Image: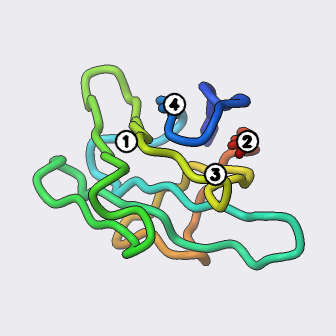
């Protein structure tokens, strides 16, 4: 199993970034996918998840209305479109896969991509 995140970087507050996660080694279209993040000195926290078909996205309250999760099962890829970014969104963002529901203890993880939002 391999999950490879990309798209992180440095952006000013109010800006946008789009993260991608390319998956391989498992049947992507049958897994729930999600994004979590970990800021320095803090625990990893849930950001967003999406079910196997893409019909049911779910968001943490802190990102609701600003972030959009989506997936392309033909390309084995999940995306996180982030808009109206805030300095408190600064963290390492991880892609995760789970057969049932994505949580902080999910089965598969990527290595993470750094997102830094400057004020």
Mark on residue 17? 4
Closer mark to the observer between disc 2 and disc 1: 2
Judge the density around disc 2: few (<14), some (14-19), many (≥20) Cα neighbours within 10 Å: some
Mark on residue 27? 1
Which residue does the numbered mark 2 point to in the structure image? 118
Q: Distance between the residues labelled 2 and 1?
A: 38 Å
Closer mark to the observer between disc 2 and disc 4: 2
Q: Distance between the residues labelled 3 and 4?
A: 14 Å
Mark on residue 51? none
Whether residue 20 is visible: no
Q: In which quarter of the image is residue 37?
A: bottom right
The earlier-in-sequence mark between 3 and 2 is 3
Q: Residue at x 71, y 39 (%)?
A: 113
Residue 41: give x, y in percent of width and height: 88, 74
Whether residue 44 is visible: yes
The earlier-in-sequence mark between 2 and 4 is 4
The earlier-in-sequence mark between 2 and 1 is 1
Residue 83: give x, y in percent of width and height: 41, 40
Which residue does the numbered mark 3 point to in the structure image? 94
Asked whether 46 or 65 is in front, the reply is 65
Task: Look at the numbered disc 2 and give the secondary structure of its residue.
Answer: strand
């Amino acid at each position: 199993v391999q999950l490879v995140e990309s798209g992180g970087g440095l952006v000013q507050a109010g800006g946008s970034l789009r993260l991608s996660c390319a998956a391989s080694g498992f049947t992507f279209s049958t897994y729930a996918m999600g994004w979590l993040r970990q800021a320095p000195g803090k625990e990893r926290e849930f950001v967003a998840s999406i079910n196997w078909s893409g019909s049911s996205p779910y968001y943490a309250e802190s990102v609701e209305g600003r972030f959009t999760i989506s997936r392309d099962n033909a390309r084995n890829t999940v995306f996180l479109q982030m808009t109206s970014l805030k300095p408190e969104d600064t963290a390492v963002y991880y892609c995760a896969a789970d057969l049932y529901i994505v949580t902080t203890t999910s089965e598969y993880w990527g290595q993470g991509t750094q997102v830094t939002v400057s004020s």
